[in-house]
Image: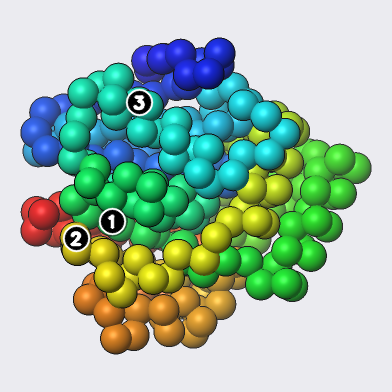
Amino acid sequence: MKQFAYKNIKVSYTDDGKGSAVVLLHGFLENKGMWDKYVSVLSKTHRVITIDLLGHGDTECLGYVHVMEDQADMIYALLVHLRLRKVALVGHSMGGYVALAFAELYPDYVKGLFLLNSTARADSDERKTNRDRAILCVKHDYTNFVRMSIANLFSEDNRERLAKEIEKTKKEALKTPVQGIIASLEGMKIRKDREVLLHFAPYPMHMVLGKKDGVLIYEDTVEQVEGTRVELTTFPDGHMSHIENEKELKIVLTDFLKKI
């Protein structure tokens, strides 16, 4: 684990392997440790950077609202620090929102975009209301909110089979500070719609979705890539494809990186 200073806070990251650079961005209530099994594979052929986003893992909070642009600016500062010029971005869920914000703000730094269980669309009004409810739940009973949130990310079919992995994921999520959770919920609630990037970005893009994702409406998300050059992979399970479909995802991700 490494750290660098950014706007008077410490940002935690890892840097493994050599070759073309890949930046792995975790989702809400996750941290860079979610990528451990992928780093061991990808670092054989690539330079792999994982980052704890603002208010998650070992990275401190920057404020009371972490908008996606704040996260993107932090990533840009890290790339400058590491003297990296072109990277492939892989983002899970909220990490995908951050990757899209980065791609909009710093397009010359992107050579490929891989969205995992994520969407380019802004929150609907209903989703925004649910974010507000979540914030109230966090303030009322932080532990119960985290444990329930994580359980709902997995398809019902996998909750018994992956019981150990789910419990481990809950323990990691509970390390996220209350301020970090609320700041991210506020930031996701007001994020921009970036669907236009799926249509006009000049670099390769790939989207991976779960058919039984309890967070994203599958049909709505698939609709975004219709008429675009974005490649789509659909798995039969939930929002946590990196765990629920680990073997298959490693193949899809490795193939994508080979192309760019």
Mark 2 vs mark 1: which is more N-terminal?
Answer: 1
Task: Report whether 214 appears left or right of 46.
Answer: right
Q: Name the element at disc 2.
A: loop
Read off the residue under disc 1. 113
Q: Between marks 2 and 1, how big is the CA–CA gap?
A: 8 Å
Callout 2: few (<14), some (14-19), or many (20+) C-alpha neighbours within 10 Å?
some
Is residue 100 visible in the rendered image? The answer is yes
Locate the N terminus and report the quarter of the image it occupies: top left
Read off the residue under disc 3. 78
Q: Amino acid at mark 1?
A: Leu
Q: Residue drawn 70% across and 67% down? A: 127
Residue 150: give x, y in percent of width and height.
Answer: 63, 51
Q: Residue furthest right?
A: 140
Q: Are marks 2 and 3 in contact (CB under 8 Å)?
A: no
Is residue 160 visible in the rendered image? The answer is no
Q: Amino acid at mark 2?
A: Tyr
In front of the other: 133 or 123 = 123
Quadrant for residue 42, please give it: top left
